[in-house]
Amino acid sequence: MSITLTERASRHVASQLARRGRGEGLRVGVRPSGCSGMAYIIEFADTIEPDDAVFESHGVKLVISPQSLLYLDGTEIDFVREGLNEGLKFNNPNVRDQCGCGESFTV
Amino acid sequence: MTLFQIAEPGQTPAPHERRRAVGIDLGTTNSLVATVRDGRPECLPDADGRVMLPSLVHYTPEGAVRVGEGARLALMTDPEHSFKSIKRLMGRSMSDVMQLRQALPYRFESGEGVPRMHVPGGSVTAVQVSSEILRALRGRAEAALGGALVGAVITVPAYFDEAQRQATRDAARLAGLHVLRLLNEPTAAAVAYGLDRRDSGTLAVFDLGGGTFDISILRLSRGVFEVLATGGDSQLGGDDFDEAVACWILDEAGIKAELSTGAQRHLQGVACQVKERLTEHAQAEVRIELGREAVWSGCLSCGRFNELIDPLVDRTLRACRRALRDAGLEAGQIDEVVMVGGATRVPRVRERVAGLFGREPLTDIDPDRVVALGAALQADVLAGNKPGEDWLLLDVIPLSLGIETLGGLVERLIPRNTTLPVARAQEFTTFRDGQTAMALHVVQGERERVEDCRSLARFELRGIPPMAAGAARIRVTFQVDADGLLTVSAVEASTGVSAEITVKPSHGLAEGEIERMLRDSVAHAAEDMQVRRLREARVEGERVRVALEAALSADAALVGEDGERITAARIGLDRALAGEDVEVLRQATAALEQACAGFVERRMNQAVARAMKGHAIDQFAHGREED
């Protein structure tokens, strides 16, 4: 079981962490909500819980709870620019369907 | 697929929880409102599905206010109280308006200050009329988005000066809108095309609206758009194409008689339809019905249409060349050309613009909507829907800000194209012994002399303790916030006395004046330089003379045998001060200083002797230790 960051994404996360000045890494997860079942969580991780799984990609720690990992296993997180938008993009192989905007999804 | 931003722990926003923000294109002819939904900008339509709101406001005799299409009929029936193209009056003073007065059907109230126009039951300003348009758009947006807006980005022409920008902000506030930022129209168009995410580049934004034409040359570097040059024609637009077609129809139909108002409108409507049909067809059928008898039908080919409008297109291209020249660029150095405004749909316009710049202009986005869409994208960022400042577009100061110094020269504190927000400080000092007040004059412009720049504000710093000339230290700070509001403060260092002013200019520059000021600054650079050198030399000479007078009146006895030399040098300086020769003036100033050297030294010695009188040397040393 694992999740990964692309090199570009890890550079982005590292620079955001550096600018913020603190944080262990990036916490990702899912929670039930949104128009299509589940929604992603993506936050700075200030603490790592004993149950958490931690993966390291290009020097950046990805922190995830075991429940969330079930939904995110095999996910690669990339950093992309699209028009004025730029941000992290989940390439999650578990997703069967997602809402129009992709903010929430079903597995 | 949505792109995610990293949130603080526990703060990941719920899906679809967005702060409602809009972009507004407050146009001369039409206005639009747009927002970002599901990551895409879109224009919001009214109940009838129309996205364009004609910028028309009618104050009815019953005291109601109608905005948009509903006010169109009143342009004929009640012209005095029906406002169109109100944008042209934004930020204008009474004296500006007096010049335009002949062309305007409104009744202006006499008096100084902001021009007021008569309406049933009172009077209104241009700001109030504009705010009605903004209020209509705000209502439309709130209905569409289901709640109050956190704010709006409103676009303004790149050449708008501080007064016109301030008037736009005031109109927004009056309409109950929080202005996140004013954005230059060409910049908004560039943002809509995503050009801001390039590292650098030079672009031309060709904006041919219904009644105005603007060309802007922008340079993008590190996420900041600089306006290199602007130009255009405030009386040229798509309506003139319609007019050309209408004239052709009258000619072909052999109609010479004066037309009734209704017939004229019918003719214009037909002409507009013909123009629109010719954007996609090689020819268009024309059929007009003027009265019962006069029916005429014919056919206008694309080629003939092009001939009709070519003189008008020529005018736009001339303005483009001028703007390029002002920017110091060749047409081939422009990386992208963005088309804005409905009239750029005309194939002939695109073709000729492409010819001038040697590249196909960008036309994928609806040219009527592109500005509003770009503003919406910017509003979405500013409302905080996409945290991260890396790609925040910054506004720049359109004209340099400075302060008047002695001799009527301008000391620029914030140069043009500096990004906002910004604060800059500089120290100034007093010119005369015992000077207790200082007048500060804030100006805007690129020229060296105050009279060639625009006066923004004057204020005084009082309560400076009397000191020798040049001893006081007065720190003047210019601060411009993200909305472009300028605050100037002055603080005297030793006492902390201070004075401050927030600049909200009440007069506007006349049409095209910013462009003229920019052009002049280039054209007159050498001459200005010479003027500056002369004035600086004069100020220096004046300072030496004043200082000498003060010294002579205090210690005439110490002049001794230098008296004659000093008098001769003083006469020489007086003569040079009256003249225009910088070198002569500098030499005369130096000669007087030299002649006084002995006298100054004797004064210095005497002052030191006086200060030390009655004190032993070790007392000074002792005093030091205690400090």
Image (cartoon, rainbow, N blue to C red):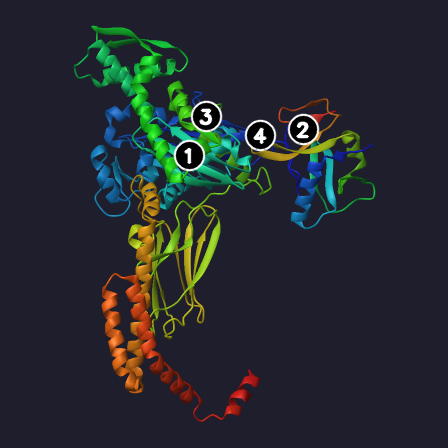
Q: Amino acid at mark 4?
A: Gly
Looking at the picture, do discs 3 and 4 lie on one chain?
yes
Q: CA distance from mark 4 to mark 1?
A: 37 Å
Q: Which chain does tag 3 point to?
A: B
Q: Nearer the viewer, mark 4 or mark 1?
A: 1
**A49 relative to B301 in the view: left or right:** right
Q: Nearer the viewer, mark 1 or mark 3?
A: 1
Counting residues from the N terminus, which is met first, the one under dot 1 or under dot 3? 1
Nearer to the camera, B510 or B224: B224
In the image, residue B588 lies at what x, y percent?
A: 29, 70
> The N terminus of chain B lies in which quarter of the figure?
top right
Task: Sort mark 1 into few (<14), some (14-19) or many (20+) by Cα contacts within 10 Å.
Answer: few
Task: Sort mark 3 into few (<14), some (14-19) or many (20+) by Cα contacts within 10 Å.
Answer: many
Residue matched to label 2:
A104
Residue matched to label 3:
B361
Q: Amino acid at mark 1?
A: Glu
Q: Which chain does tag 4 point to?
A: B
Callout 3: SS: loop
Q: CA distance from mark 2 to mark 3?
A: 38 Å
Looking at the picture, do discs 4 and 1 lie on one chain?
yes
Residue matched to label 1:
B330
Looking at the picture, do discs 1 and 3 lie on one chain?
yes
**B185 relative to A83 in the view: left or right:** left
Q: Is residue B394 above or below residue B375?
A: below
Looking at the picture, do discs 4 and 2 lie on one chain?
no
Residue matched to label 4:
B39
Task: Sort mark 2 into few (<14), some (14-19) or many (20+) by Cα contacts within 10 Å.
Answer: many
Q: CA distance from mark 2 to mark 1?
A: 50 Å
Nearer to the camera, B574 or B476: B574
